[in-house]
Amino acid sequence: MILDRIVLGLTSSRIREKLIQEGDKLTLEKAIKVARTFEYAQSQMKSMENKEKDISALQRRQMRKLQQRIAKLCSSE
């Protein structure tokens, strides 16, 4: 069956597991929808992780600048 080949040929074990859980209710249309939804969710998660890294980097730079200003103020006294 084509669906069996699709499910077994997937590289993502998470998508494969989700499709297998569907059992006899799985259709080609549903398999495509599940896979696309999963891929979209993964790309969104990656995007969020990148934004979190950018925010963390910005916060670290701001903290270093603040520490440098404080150090200058303390050394000038």
Image (cartoon, rainbow, N blue to C red):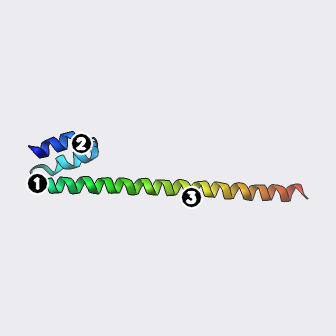
Q: Which residue lies furthest to the front in this view?
A: 2
* Dot 2 amino acid type: Leu
Count residues near mark 1 (Cα–Cα under 10 Å), then give few for <14, some for 14-19, many for 20+. Answer: few
The quadrant the C terminus occupies is bottom right
The numbered disc on residue 10 is 2
Element carrying mark 1? helix
Q: Tell me if 75 is positioned left or right of 63 in this view.
A: right
Snapshot quadrant of residue 56: bottom right
Residue closer to the observer: 70 or 37: 37
Instruction: Tell me which residue sits at (17%, 56%) in the image.
Output: 30
Q: Which of marks 3 and 2 is in front?
A: 2
> Marks 3 and 2, how far apart in space?
35 Å
Instruction: Tell me which residue sits at (56%, 58%) in the image.
Output: 55
Snapshot quadrant of residue 10: top left
> Marks 1 and 3, how far apart in space?
43 Å
Element carrying mark 3? helix
Residue closer to the observer: 73 or 53: 53
The quadrant the N terminus occupies is top left
Dot 1 or dot 2, earlier in sequence: 2
* Dot 1 amino acid type: Lys
Element carrying mark 2? loop
* Dot 3 amino acid type: Ile
- The x, y position of residue 44, in whole percent, is 39, 57
The numbered disc on residue 6 is none
Count residues near mark 3 (Cα–Cα under 10 Å), then give few for <14, some for 14-19, many for 20+. Answer: few
Residue behind mark 3? 55
- The x, y position of residue 32, in whole percent, is 20, 54
> Marks 1 and 2, how far apart in space?
19 Å
Residue behind mark 1? 25
Instruction: Tell me which residue sits at (28%, 46%) in the image.
Output: 14
Dot 1 or dot 3, earlier in sequence: 1
Q: Nearer the viewer, mark 1 or mark 2?
A: 2
